[in-house]
Image (cartoon, rainbow, N blue to C red):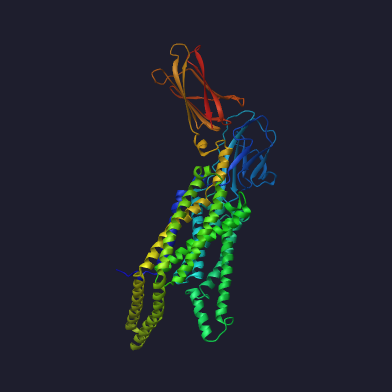
Amino acid sequence: MTPPTARRPLPIAGALLAALVCALLGTLALGATPAAAHAALTATDPADGSVVKTAPQRVKLTFSEGVLLSADSLRVLDPRGTRVEEGRAAHADGASDTATVALRGGLADGTYTVAWQAVSADSHPVGGAFTFSIGAPSKTTVKAPAADVDPAVGALYGIGRYAAYAGFVLLVGGCVFAGVSRSSRAVQKIAVGGWVTLFASTTALLLLRGAYTNTKGLGSVLDFSLLGGVLSTKPGAALLSRLLLLSAAAVFLAVLFGSYAPGDAPAAAAREKGRKDKEGVGVGAGAGDGRRGLAYGLAVGGTIVAAGLAATWSLAEHASVGIQPYLAMPVDILHLLAVGCWLGGLVALLVTLRSDTPIRRAAVQRFSRLAFASVCVLVATGTYQSWRQVGTWGALTGTAYGRWLLIKIGLVAVVVGLAYFSRRWTNRLADRTDAGGKRERAAKPAKAAKATKAAEKAKVAVGGGGASAERTAQLARQRAAMDRAAGQRRRDADENRTGLRRSVLAETGVAVVLLAVTTVLSGTQPGRAETEQQQAAGGGSASGAASAGPVDVKIPYDTGGADGRGTARITIDPARSGDNTVEARTEGPDGRPVDVPELDISLTEKEKKIGPLHTSLNRQSAGRWKATGFQLPMAGDWQLTLTVRTSDIDQVTEIKNVKIN
């Protein structure tokens, strides 16, 4: 069996990154719900389904948060499908949470369709349609256009969002771990891998953004006119700023893993100081002082770059809209930085424990303290964000955002419990790691020098070339690999190090799922906005919206003549304001279909004095009639009037009440 140390850090780091991405994509599939729209339409003027006596001068929409508008954000179509709006859509009186467009004069009576599409201020596209009537409802040939994002574009954009979060976490966490605990080849690969992932995903998001917000296909990804429009918006500017900040981050990485010592940074600084003290060099002069200055510069510069990267999310998503944005944005930046330090640092610690790199107890304890502080920041900032986005206890269980938030809270509790065990293993790691690490660090250069010297002697013995020299060099490399494997077995024999590694692995696994849930939350309509939308629609709760559906009415009738008794079964689908389908079936006393010479159905809204609105029933077969495109202008309690004629003189009218949502 291959010894554990035969595994190199690169495959381990790659496997961890792949697992992270897979977990995020899996949660993306679970979290892609219809509630992902963020700006909720709360009111329209004219109202949805209403009948107005005279033609309005304009159409106005009001949203739960600010929206970005384009030239075609509002289209108003007459019953024949002709556009009747004038000019571009704009914000009413400069209010960013409104959209309005003027209408032509002299509009005829009938039913008009308003199709709208916008981008919410937190960067998500929204769209829909509603109808209103002038004078009286009429038939309309207009089919409400779909406002859905192209499936391929939506899937790629979602993958890019998840990859961007993952890259940010790995970049920040890897750099922080290298600066405060241990810098190694494995940690460097984690940080550089995070930078590459974040850069590639941000570039992809920038190219996909135009097609995503304009509901176009993949063929428009390279449409430079769309790209120009994206760069003029807040989300586009944020993505471009992120790319510029990543250029600064590349310089930071080069210094951190180049000029700055690649080993245990604080320990290396202490050794350098001791060496200078022995040589009589003052503390304020020489490389020791330069190293401290470099460390300070890296800390300040790295914090600024990391905060800037986090701000590219905060300035373009949830934190920038809603209540208290001036406080929510800096809180969101702190939240993202804490996630990066904690989760990314866990990944760096895990690959360090899995590799053949020795790590000192003091280094692990430094990271443990940093992780604990990060979790405290996460809890504090997360509590504020939860209150801000949910608003009420009812929204916590009655909205998609609230339910995902409850899952996140549960995962945080699990991670805190696992972190407790990790801290216990860290304390147990103390003495053995220090002693063993010193012996291994002392032995490792000697073994490497010995192997190199043996290889050089072998080359000299055979004249510096040929198959024998190559074979001897290969044997030397194998001996060095065996020495590393032996060192790894000694470290794995330490149950405290093994226990810490397993505990950190469990903590990292749960934290990855937690990051995925957090990303889902960033793409889910906040509970506060969803509640406002439900209240505006008149439902007041999720259950009110869920009650909409087909209405079935059973009406017995008796016209008094021969064969005048029977039952009419009427279905109105979906029994909501707007287009409906009405089906009617007439049956005799034996339950068999029976034809009647005449059947008429009308609906009247007595309170609003609307109607009667008559259906245009078409005979489908014996005892079966159907009407499509039947317009009901508004929700309410409607009176259904059924008139049945079974002969030239035998006729009856029956009335039932139906609920239209």
Q: Residue at x 37, y 81 (%)?
A: 447
Tell me: residue 241, above or below residue 181.
above
Between 224 and 379, the one lying in front of the other is 379
User: Looking at the rendering, in which quadrant would you find the N terminus?
Assistant: bottom left
- In the picture, residue 630 is in which quadrant? top right
Tell me: residue 459, above or below residue 382.
below
User: Looking at the rendering, in which quadrant would you find the C terminus?
Assistant: top right
Q: Position of residue 390 (x, y in %)?
A: 55, 47
| Count of picture labels | 0
Residue 315 showing in the rendered view: no
Tell me: residue 491, above or below residue 659.
below
Q: Position of residue 507 (x, y in %)?
A: 43, 59
- In the picture, residue 638 is in which quadrant? top right
Tell me: residue 62, above or below residue 451.
above
Q: Residue at x 62, y 25 (%)?
A: 609
Q: Residue furthest left?
A: 1
On screen, residue 551 versus residue 126, left or right, reads left
Residue 179 showing in the rendered view: yes
Between 216 and 2, the one lying in front of the other is 2
Q: Position of residue 621 (x, y in %)?
A: 44, 24
On screen, residue 502 versus residue 103, left or right, reads left
Between 173 and 410, the one lying in front of the other is 410
